[in-house]
Amino acid sequence: MMQPRNPNQRNNFPRPYGSGSMYPMQLGGNNQFGGRNNDKNKRVEKKRPNPFGDKNLKTIDYLDAKSLLRFTNPHGKILPKRILGTTAYQQRQLTKAIKFARHLALLPFVGNDLA
């Protein structure tokens, strides 16, 4: 006759891969690929200097096409704020200024090599 199961007792079924793990990739270490996390492989992001300075910028001049070209790559794409170091507000203002300058044909939509 079977004994009644105690709810506080765990099932002692044999695990297929040993060491209490359900999957073989968990045997080797702490991360999902079985190895240990190495701190030497982590990238350290440096704080980029703000190109507009720390001043509170009200507007970015869309007519100054030469300065707006600094914020686009050779293909004509707008660089992200993680590369530029701008704040979120400044990045939105910069994007609006670049798009408006493109609309007025002060800046190209694509780079010279793609046209």
Image (cartoon, rainbow, N blue to C red):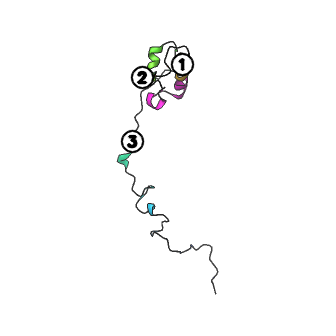
Label placed on residue 43: 3
Comparing labels 3 and 2, the label whose residue is closer to the camera: 2
Look at the numbered discs 3 and 2 and tell me whether their residues touch, using CB distance below 8 Å: no
Q: Is residue 113 left or right of residue 104?
A: left
Task: Indicate the quadrant where residue 114 lies.
Answer: top left
Quadrant occupied by the N terminus = bottom right
Residue found 40% across the figure and 34% down from its top: 46
Residue found 53% across the figure and 74% down from its top: 13
Assign the magenta stretch its main secondary structure: helix
Mark 3: give few (<14), some (14-19) or many (20+) Cα within 10 Å: few
Observer-nearest residue: 62 or 56?
62
User: What are the residue bounds of the magenta stretch?
Assistant: 78-92
Q: Amino acid at mark 1?
A: Ala
Observer-nearest residue: 47 or 69?
69
Describe the element under mark 1 as helix, strand or loop. helix
Q: Is residue 76 magenta?
A: no
Mark 1: give few (<14), some (14-19) or many (20+) Cα within 10 Å: many
Q: Is residue 27 left or right of residue 90?
A: left
Describe the element under mark 3 as helix, strand or loop. loop
Comparing labels 2 and 1, the label whose residue is closer to the camera: 2
Residue 88 percent across, percent down from the top left = 53, 28
Q: Amino acid at mark 2?
A: Asp
Residue 27 higher or lower than 67, as above or below: below
- Going from the N terminus, do you reach mark 2 or mark 1 first? 1
Label placed on residue 113: 2
Residue 21 higher or lower than 3, as above or below: above
- Residue placed furthest toward the front: 115
- Going from the N terminus, do you reach mark 3 or mark 2 first? 3
Q: CA distance from mark 1 to mark 3?
A: 33 Å
Q: CA distance from mark 2 to mark 1?
A: 23 Å
Observer-nearest residue: 90 or 22?
22
Which residue is denoted by mark 1 in the rendering? 97
